[in-house]
């Protein structure tokens, strides 16, 4: 408050007094001293106010004073222009709410209510608060600010108010977000790498890596597709529509054209943020979700693109950063695919090695047991005959020679079957189909096995209706010879074996039926498995290597057919196989 006018008025009144001049001069001198002091004080106050204004106008932080009654600005420092683009006079008297984002408005309502109640307990005790808000710039953008505030009573009015100092932390927030994004990127890349190393299931690994890339780029939809065997189309591994309506069958192949072809041709990640208006959009099939933007990253093995990681429908535009992310995750998918292929190859090689070892053991077993017996017979009989020829009658010689002959034929047949089966396992057999007569070829085989059947009094009946089929002649004979011989072996004396065929448009079904001993279910289940090779003796203790039925299965399947048995214990068995129409 300036008292200079009052001092001037007082001086005039003293001068007009009718008193002793010395006393008057003394009063005026004292009054001048007071005036000098007042002037000095006023000068200092003006200087201080200018200094304070200079500070408040030039500091980066913005000082607000807010009336607590209605949350209106009562003072705003000039530095607000740098922060929000407003002049102080634009804000003073205005509510603070329109200058905050919606989330910050709700936050202010919440904390103000809580802090006012705390302030009323002791208005003279200062409590300082630090908060982060989003304040609205004049251009409509949101500015991240950090605000330090406290409540106080106004010195002149006594009304409660808030004193706040705000500073722009947008850059700091952006750096924090960038750091968070980078940490998340590193974390997901590490998780993806860990899955590639630890998870053997390629589909599971690829799906999870795809989800990581979708999460980091913000894409809603996408897929992973692999190049088909003809290098002409993409076979979709899986499709994620992101909750959007999609009527496209994910099992359908996708031709390599449009933006996908660009990726295959260049081997580079490519994106289009205006895909709806792109000439490539015409290649989208009916029912496909509308796509504002898309991005494709190549899956590569040995430098060759063998598939795609596709992403689409990001809320904002795809960026080079997104492309880098997609490329990184596509590389992980490629490594997972290569690992999966290598694992499949390794497992296949292990299986082949195991199978080869088993075949080797099987061959050795057959050679050691089933071939040794006939050769022992041959060696023993031939030695006896050579040493004692003159002691045998013609009938005895005939019987021994007959035994030698049948034993030799048995050993030779077994050896031929082993060689044939071995060649089939090694893929050395070549199918040479010809048209043949089922009846004629079967009748010829029966003549060769009449002796075996006659020894047990077994009758063999062959269906004589004319049926022609297309098959490899030697393989067909081997199949039929084994099945008929097997039927004789397990048919009791004076039994019957029937051989017949049925034909339709799909091919021919041939049946070798016996009324022998039959088989249990558990034995049938193991019948065709080389791992559990069975060597069951016949009804009159006939021996066999157990390789015959296994060989039949190999040869039937080489023709594209199938073989099976229908059997009942004590009733007999029907061995059936099919030869597809040629």
Image (cartoon, rainbow, N blue to C red):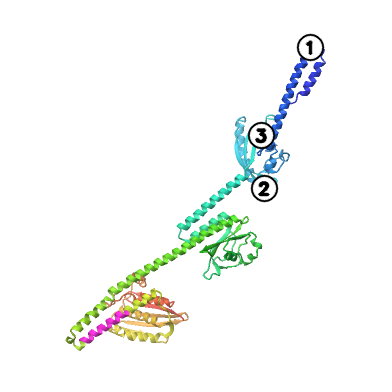
Q: Residue furthest front?
A: 303
Q: Residue furthest top?
A: 20
C-alpha separation, residue under disc 3 versus residue under disc 1:
55 Å
Secondary structure at numbered mark 3: strand
Question: Would you say 486 lies left or right of 269 here?
Answer: left
Contact, CB < 8 Å: mark 3 with mark 1?
no
Q: Residue furthest bottom?
A: 394
Percent of width and height locating residue 292 = 63, 60
The numbered mark at residue 173 is none
Earlier residue among tags 2 and 3: 2
Residue tagged 2: 141
- Is residue 545 positioned above or below 36 on the image? below
Contact, CB < 8 Å: mark 2 with mark 3?
no
Q: Is residue 239 visible?
A: no
The numbered mark at residue 161 is 3
69 or 98, which is in the foreground? 98
Question: Would you say 340 lies left or right of 569 here?
Answer: right
- Neighbourhood count class around disc 1 (C-alpha, 10 Å): few under 14, some 14–19, many 20 upward: few
Q: Which residues are magenta?
A: 396-413
Percent of width and height locating residue 360 = 34, 71
Earlier residue among tags 1 and 2: 1
- Is residue 252 positioned above or below 110 on the image? below
Residue tagged 1: 22
Percent of width and height locating residue 217 = 58, 55
**Number of the front mark, 1 or 2:** 1
**Number of the front mark, 2 or 3:** 2
Q: How many marks?
A: 3
Q: Residue 113 sits in which quadrant? A: top right
Question: Would you say 129 lies left or right of 138 here?
Answer: left
């Amino acid at each position: 408050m300036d008292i200079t006018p009052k001092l001037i008025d007082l001086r005039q009144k003293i001068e007009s007094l009718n008193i002793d001049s010395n006393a008057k001069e003394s009063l005026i001198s004292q009054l001048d001293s007071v005036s000098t002091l007042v002037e000095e004080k006023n000068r200092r106050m003006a200087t201080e106010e200018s200094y304070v204004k200079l500070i408040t106008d030039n500091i980066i932080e913005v000082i607000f004073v807010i009336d607590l009654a209605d949350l209106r600005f009562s003072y705003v420092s000039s530095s607000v222009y740098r922060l929000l683009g407003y002049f102080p006079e634009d804000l003073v008297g205005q509510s603070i709410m329109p200058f905050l984002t919606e989330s910050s408005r709700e936050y202010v309502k919440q904390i103000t209510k809580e802090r006012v109640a705390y302030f009323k307990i002791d208005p003279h005790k200062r409590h300082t608060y630090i908060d982060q808000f989003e304040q609205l710039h004049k251009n409509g953008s949101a500015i991240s600010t950090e605000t330090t505030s406290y409540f106080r009573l106004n010195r002149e009015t006594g009304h409660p108010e808030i004193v706040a100092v705000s500073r722009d932390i947008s850059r700091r927030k952006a750096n924090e977000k960038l750091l968070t994004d980078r940490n998340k990127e590193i974390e997901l890349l590490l998780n993806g790498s860990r899955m590639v190393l630890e998870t053997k299931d390629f589909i599971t690994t690829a799906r999870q890596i795809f989800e990581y890339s979708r999460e980091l780029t913000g894409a809603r939809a996408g897929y992973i597709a692999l190049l088909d065997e003809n290098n002409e189309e993409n076979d979709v591994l899986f499709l994620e529509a992101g909750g959007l309506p999609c009527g496209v069958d994910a099992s359908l192949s996708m031709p390599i054209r449009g933006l996908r072809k660009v990726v295959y041709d260049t081997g580079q990640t490519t994106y289009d943020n205006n895909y709806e208006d792109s000439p490539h959009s015409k290649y989208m099939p009916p029912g496909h979700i509308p796509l504002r933007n898309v991005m494709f990253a190549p899956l590569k093995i040995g430098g060759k693109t063998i598939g795609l990681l596709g992403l689409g429908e990001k809320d904002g535009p795809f960026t080079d950063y997104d492309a880098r992310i997609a490329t990184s995750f596509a590389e992980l998918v490629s490594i997972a695919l290569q690992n999966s292929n290598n694992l499949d190859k390794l497992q296949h090689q292990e299986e082949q090695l195991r199978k080869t070892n088993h075949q080797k053991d099987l061959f050795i077993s057959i050679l050691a047991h089933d071939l040794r017996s006939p050769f022992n017979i041959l060696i023993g009989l031939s030695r006896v005959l050579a040493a004692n020829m003159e002691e045998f009658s013609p009938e005895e010689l005939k019987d021994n020679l007959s035994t030698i002959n049948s034993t030799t034929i048995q050993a030779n047949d077994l050896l031929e079957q082993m060689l044939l089966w071995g060649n089939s396992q090694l893929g050395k057999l070549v199918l040479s189909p010809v048209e043949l007569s089922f009846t004629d070829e079967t009748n010829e085989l029966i003549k060769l096995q009449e002796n075996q059947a006659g020894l047990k009094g077994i009758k063999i009946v062959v269906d004589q209706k004319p049926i022609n089929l297309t098959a490899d002649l030697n393989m067909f004979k081997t199949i039929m010879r084994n099945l008929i011989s097997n039927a004789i072996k397990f048919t009791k004396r004076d039994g019957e074996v029937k051989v017949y065929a049925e034909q339709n448009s799909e091919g021919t079904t041939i049946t070798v039926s016996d009324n022998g001993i039959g088989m249990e279910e558990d034995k049938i289940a193991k019948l065709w498995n080389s791992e559990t090779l069975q060597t069951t003796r016949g009804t009159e203790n006939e021996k066999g290597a157990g390789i015959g039925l296994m060989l039949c299965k190999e040869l039937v399947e080489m023709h594209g057919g199938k073989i099976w048995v229908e059997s009942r214990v004590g009733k007999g068995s029907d061995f059936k196989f099919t030869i597809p129409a040629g």
